[in-house]
Image (cartoon, rainbow, N blue to C red):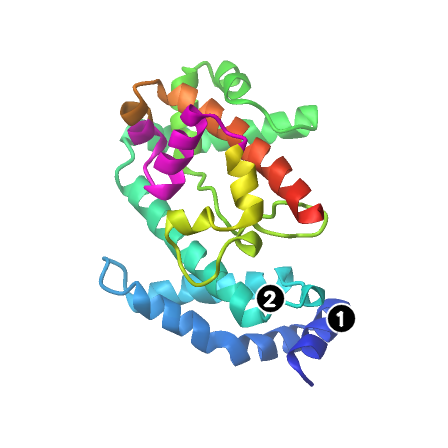
Amino acid sequence: MDEKELFEQYHKTHDVALRNQIAEKYLFIASMIAKKFVGRGVEYDDLFQVASLALLKGIDRFDETKGLKFSTFITPTITGEIKNYFRDRSRLIHLPRRIAELRVSVKKAEEELSLATGKHPTAKEIAQKLGVPEEDVLSCMEAGSVVSLDKPVDDEDGASFYDVLPSDEDDFERIMENDAVRRALSQLNDTEKKLISCRFGQELSQAETARRMNVSQMYVSRMERKILQKLKEDLKQGLLE
C-alpha cells in the first residue's frame, strides 16, 4: 500500500492501527528535527515527545488529495510546533506571578462567557467579568496563545499557512517569495508590515513589539488580531484563485 492509499484508508476508517503504522514510518523525521533543537535548554526526550505529538496531529490534518508529499508537509509542521513549545516555555518562565495566577481565572471566564453567549469573548468582556484591567487580560492571553503557521487558513479545506510557505527554509524573507503571501502582505500598510515583521520575523513578544513601535501593548494586540484576520481572508482568496 503506497502513501496515498495508506492515508486514504486511514481517513476513511480512522483506524488507530493504521495511524500508528503511518507514524512509525515517519517517526524518523520527528527524531531528526528534535535533535536539531537539542542544546537550547530542553532535553531531547521532551523535544521528541513534542515532535511526535505534532506528527500524530499532522497525520490527521494531512490531505493526500492535494498532491503534496507527507514528508514535505510534516517537516515544517513539526518544526513550527517545537518553536511554539520554546516560545510558550520562555513566556511561562518569565511571566509575573500575578499574571500567571490570573491566567486560570481568565481561562475559566473565557469558557463561561463562550458557553453563555455562543461566541468567543473579547478581552474587554473578560476583564469586566473579572473586574480587572483589560491590559492584564491581554497579557494573560498573550502568554497562553502563540500564533502557529500550522493553523488552518481555511477551516473548510484545512489549508495551513505552511501550505503556502516554502518548506525548505524558515527565514522571514523567504515568505515574501510566495505569490499568495506576497499579495496578501502587499495589502498591509507600513505600520502593519512593521508589526508582522516584529512579531513573526523577529519573534518578539507583544510587549517587546509595543516598545519597538512606541505604542501600547493593547494596541499591538488589537492590531495583530485585525491583521491576522485580514491575512487569513486574503490568503484564503489567493488559494481559491
Taking depth in this image into account, of 156 and 107 the one nearest to the observer is: 156
Q: Amino acid at mark 2?
A: Ile
Q: Is residue 95 left or right of residue 10?
A: left
The answer to which quarter of the image holds residue 22 is bottom right
Q: Is residue 156 left or right of residue 27?
A: right
Tell me how far mark 1 sits from mark 2, CA to CA.
13 Å
Q: Residue furthest bottom?
A: 1
From the image, tell me which residue sits under label 2.
Answer: 59
Q: Is residue 111 visible?
A: yes
From the image, tell me which residue sits under label 1.
Answer: 13
- Crowd band around label 1 with a 10 angstrom C-alpha radius: few (<14), some (14–19), many (20+): few
Q: Quadrant of the N terminus?
A: bottom right
Q: Residue at x 23, y 57 (%)?
A: 41
Q: Is residue 3 left or right of residue 225?
A: right
Taking depth in this image into account, of 4 and 111 the one nearest to the observer is: 4
Magenta-colored stretch includes residue 105:
no
Q: Is residue 151 visible?
A: no
- Is 63 drawn above or below residue 92 in the view shown? below
Residue extent of the magenta highlight: 187-209
Q: Amino acid at mark 1?
A: Thr
